Structure formats: C-alpha cells, structure tokens
Amino acid sequence: MSTREAAISRALAFFDSGFRDRLAALVAIPSTSQDPAYAGDLARYLEEAMRPWLTRLGCAVAVHANPVAAGGPILVAERFEGPGLPTVLSYGHGDTVRGLDEQWRPGLSPWTLVEQDGRWYGRGTADNKGQHALNLSALEAVLAERGRLGFNFKLVLETSEERGSPGLREFVAAQRSALAADVLIGSDGPRVAPETPTIATGTRGTFHFDLIVTLRPGGVHSGHWGGLIADPAVVLAHAIAAICDRHGRILVPGWLPAAVPESVAAVLNGCVVSGGDGAVIDPEWGEPGLSSAEKIFGWNGLIVLAMVSGRPENPVNAVAPDARAHCQIRYTVDTDPAVFAPALRRHLDAAGFSEVRIENSGVRMRASRTDPAHPWVRWTAASLERTLGRPVQVIPNSSGGLPGDVFADTLDVALVWVPHSYASCGQHGPDEHLLIAPAREAIAGFAGLWWDLGEPGSAPTVPTAA
C-alpha cells in the first residue's frame, strides 16, 4: 500500500542517487537571457531538458512564443486528473543571469556543476533551475508511489525572468482560462536563514531610476579649473545624501509605508534573518526602530546599483563634465510606486538640486502580497512542518523580486513561495551555489506537500468574497 512516508523516502532516495546528475544536465545548458548570443539555449532548455521530463510525468506540454518580441519562450504543462480536484499552478524560470565566467574562483565554471564543501556550484543551481527541479522531482516521486497525483497540476516555466519577465503578464492574461488554479505554489529566492524553512506570500517590487548631473560639454583641466567650477560627482554625491542618510534611512517624503502593517509585524515577530556563510547584518543600517526582518521584508530600501564620473579605469587630470548613478527602490505593496519619481523631483528641488535630472524611472517588477494568514499559507506551513518536524517561518514577502503579481492580479490566486536557497548563494554573481542539505530537506518537504494535496478533502476551503 502506498504511503506518505514511502513517497518521501522515494524522493530522498532519488536525491541521494540521481538528483545531482539531473541538476548537472540542466546547469550545462547556458540559458542566460541577458546575452542575445544564447537565445537558442533558452529554447533548448525548454524543448530538450523540460519537455521530455514533463511528458514522462503525464503532462500535456506546449512551448509558446513570447507575446513580446524581446522575451524568451514560455512553457506551459498540465496534468489533468479530473474535475472537482484541487488545481495547483507552479512556476519557475529556466533563464539565468550572465555566466560571468572570468569572475568565478579557480576550479569553478558557471556551466559545469561542481560539488565542494556541501555545495553544488553552477549558474542556475539556486536561481532557479535547482529550485524547480527539486519540486518536479518530488512530484515525480509522489506520482511513482501513488500512481496518480490526486490533484490537477499546471506549470508555467518562463525564460525571461532575469530581464524582468517581459511578456509574461500579457501571456498569462491571454491564457487566463487555461491557467486557472486554486493556488500558486512555487519556489525561488532565499530562506530567511539557511537552516530555517520559509514560506513567502509575495515579493517586494523594484523601481529603478537614473540620477544625472551634466554641467558642461567636456572635461576641463583639473589644475586650471579645479576649485573654480562645480564638480558633477560632488553634486551628485550630495544629492544622494539628501535622499538617503549616512545610515541608509530614506529621507524622501512619500517613499515609505505609513507603518509596518499589523499582520506583517505579527508574522515577523521573532523572525531571525541570517545571510549565512559569515555574512554580517549592519544593525545600524536602515529605518530606525525596525527589526532586521521588518527592514527587509516589511519596508522599503534604496540601493545605488552603480555610479560613475570620469573614467575610473583610466583617470585623467580633469574635472569631469557629468556624473550618473543608477538607483533602485525595493518596495512593498504598502507604497504606491507611482509617487516615487514626482516625490523625488519635489524633494531634490526643495534641497537645492534642480540641476540633477531624473531619467528612465519606472517599475521593473511589481510588488505582491497574499495575506500571511490565508488558508493556503497555513495549509502549506502545516504540511511542511509535518514532514520536517519543526516550525516554518512565514514572511509577508520575500526581499527580492518575482512576477507573483502577474498571477495574483490576473488569475486571482494565493501566492505561496517556498524558497530552497539562502541569501549568500551567489545568485547574480560569481560562484553561485545550492546548499545540499537544505536542498535534500526541500525535496522531502515537497514530496509530503504533493502527497497531502492529493489526499481527498485535504485542500483548504477558501471563502469566496461576498
């Protein structure tokens, strides 16, 4: 007789004997969406790596062209077992950031899986190939054990997430009926700490803008003119200081939530945030009076992603003609991003920086949040806790960005993100890796979750709006 425990054991046995090779094959496809030269590998990931696997799982699979010309293809898979059963939509992305080959330490390469010190190194191991591969491998184990799932399963696997998911909103809207589901359960991003199982019910959004100071057509001799004319780099530095103080506190009126909502503060009470690998949080950075968890999961933050004046790689004795900074706001649903640019303009003018231009401003990824007390969130936490034997930390939204808003807005589904990585995994940089121990725990947790979902009457009943 098939049992929950046998399904979990089956998943763990595969993890110990075959998952590494499966992940290595996925990593070997250099499916970066940030370099047009690899566009063919985006399609190859879906067609050669994912379609055969999903077909073996009894899914009908289709790969669609992106409705936006600049976007990569999108795969949709469905295993339909019957009307009246719960329907789960899952999500992942097969694209990665650039390999950054030259930046990896000796012995490592982005497109070759290497195991060292309890880690699997390779581009996509954490973001996001390893995460959706764990979930699908757990699904495979449950199907093999039970002979069926006991629920309907749908999957959207895109290849443009690392470029802001262009075309995904349009695609999901066009496929709204086909993608209808009771809940979205997917995995991306980091846990709050490597050892802490985590559920995120949304993500912070990202708003980008450029600050530009242009004072003259070209550089002028620093000896003859230094001290006599304005230096755009100094002006820009002071303008940034007027936006954010020495300790990272945002100073622009309208850029912050009125307060951390009570429901958010409640789930974050006692939440311990850790980057792992010796990463140290600066307790003095950010909004005073908030815990580290509230700062990163319940508040907004300003980051200067890049700034330049002159030619740092080859300085010359000249006062530069201009200076530029590219900035980002990570924001929660408690703030309207439509106010960011006009509020900044008013603030800079009032502070005496009318010469600082704001250009290329706009949302790259929208914020999203499902109520942390939603029945699907509680159900998922209970299932994972039953398997793992310890509490799961629920957070109102992960610190990074994901296109959860697309599914919440278009399909009206609850968002349940169960991350399998951690903050120091190296995603978006060199030496990206997946911690093996949390990954093994993840496949067990999802095997139990998929099993529970297929048990008659297990899925939560969600009240409909009046």
Image: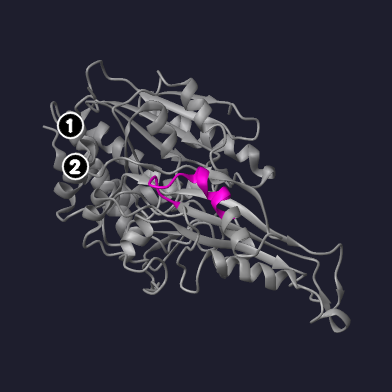
* Amino acid, disc 1: Pro
Percent position (x, y) of residue 40? 64, 37
Residue 378 marker? 2
Residue 461 showing in the rendered view: yes
Residue plotted at (59% across, 35% down): 72
The answer to whether 9 is drawn above or below residue 46 in the figure is below
Q: Quadrant of residue 349?
A: bottom right
* Residue pointed to by mark 1: 460
Q: Is residue 337 magenta?
A: yes
For the N terminus, give its image quadrant: top left
Residue 98 showing in the rendered view: no
Q: Secondary structure at mark 1?
A: loop
Count of labels shown? Answer: 2
Residue plotted at (35% across, 28% down): 412
Mark 2 and mark 1 lie on one chain; the one further toward the N terminus is 2
Residue plotted at (69% across, 44% down): 37
Which residue appears farthest toward the left when viewing the image?
A: 1
Left or right, 285 with respect to 466, comes to right
Residue plotted at (18% across, 35% down): 452
For the C terminus, give its image quadrant: top left
Q: Is residue 397 magenta?
A: no
Left or right, 420 with respect to 3, comes to right
Q: Quadrant of residue 117?
A: bottom left
* Amino acid, disc 2: Arg
Query: Magenta stretch?
Result: 331-344
Which one is in front, 16 or 319?
319
Which residue appears farthest toward the front when viewing the image?
A: 350
* C-beta proximity under 8 Å, tags 2 and 1: yes
Q: Secondary structure at mark 2?
A: helix
Residue 8 marker? none
Q: Quadrant of residue 187?
A: top left
